[in-house]
Image (cartoon, grey):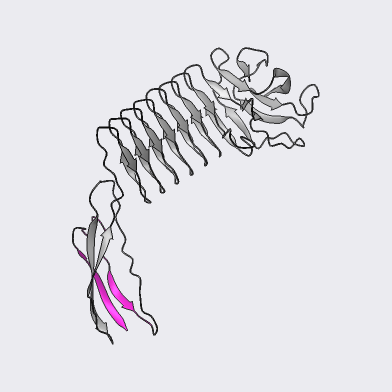
Amino acid sequence: MTVQYATANSTAKAGEDYIAASGTLTFNPGDTTKTLSVSVIGDTISEPDEIFFVNLSNPSFAIIADAKATGTIRNNDTKATLGKDTIYGTFGNDSIDGLAGSDLIYGGTGNDSLFGGEGNDSLSGEAGNDILNGGNGKDSLVGGAGNDSLAGGADDDTLVGSAGNDSLSGDDGNDNLVGGAGNDSLSGGNGNDTLSGVDSSNSAPGKGELDTLIGGLGSDRFVLGDASKGAYYNDGNASNSGTSDFALITDFSTTQDFIQLAGVAANYILSSSVGNTDIFRDNDGTPGFSANDELIARVAGVTGLNLSASYFVYV
């Protein structure tokens, strides 16, 4: 048994909202249903749901009881106002602009683009590879699961990449950047920023991670440990030097930046080579570097560091 089908416009227009389709469906003995797929053309315009028709014709060995079906294209783009908005994305790839006002924006699943605009905004990308831009104001950005790109914009912002290989840019202001789990790249931009590449709530923060920390202009703090979890990037294996997980600090300045370490200076060893300084956690207590010590950070382009200097801060 066969039947021909063809799409037809209603409020949805072929070539603008969906791709026209036509053809023949064949039902084998025992078949009672067939699935017809129509490709939707996505956009970033907030608009009502739209419909199109599927017309059936020319059946063979059958009678058509209902020759017209209706398909609905759901809108997944949200229009904000100039006030304080709370906006939720859908299961698709959403583009949401909060405009002016202090907004709460949630991307939902999918690869979303969220823009806070003016105001102190809170943006959460949730699942998917998302792009978040806080705009002007003191914003809070959380990438969620996936490989996300976060930009704070002007003012003092908090950026959290969460799980995935994320890219964080504080831009202007005194920003707090937290990469979370994964191989992250953090750039503070202008201002006095705090950069941590790890999720400090993990049992072994930084284990298996290679993070890049770029302070930018200003007096920046590079966080390599805390009083609760100890040194970050410690794989717990004293039989190797841990060269597969560490933080790369690219632009450390001894005159204005700080490196935060857990414990006391005696817990660490510095080793310089090829114009760089490696910071090791002393695992065996023997004087000088040994293969059992754990690499936690590499300070690029800087030598002559002193663990007793004021630019090392111990917690």
* Residue at far bottom of view: 61
Please tell me which residue lies in front, 251 or 129.
Answer: 129
Q: Which residue is drawn at the image coordinates 71% and 31% (left, top)?
A: 294
Q: Is residue 29 above or below residue 223?
A: below
**Number of numbered labels in the structure image:** 0
Counting from the top left corner in percent of width and height, residue 209 is at 60, 37
Name above or below for residue 9 compared with residue 280. Answer: below
The magenta span reads: 1-28
Q: Is residue 44 magenta?
A: no
Rendered view: 208 above or below 50: above
Q: Residue at x 26, y 77 (%)?
A: 4
Q: Residue at x 30, y 81 (%)?
A: 2
Image: 169 above or below 27: above
The quarter in which the C terminus is drawn is top right
Q: Is residue 177 left or right of residue 244?
A: left
Q: In the current view of this chain or complex, which residue is farthest to the left?
A: 10
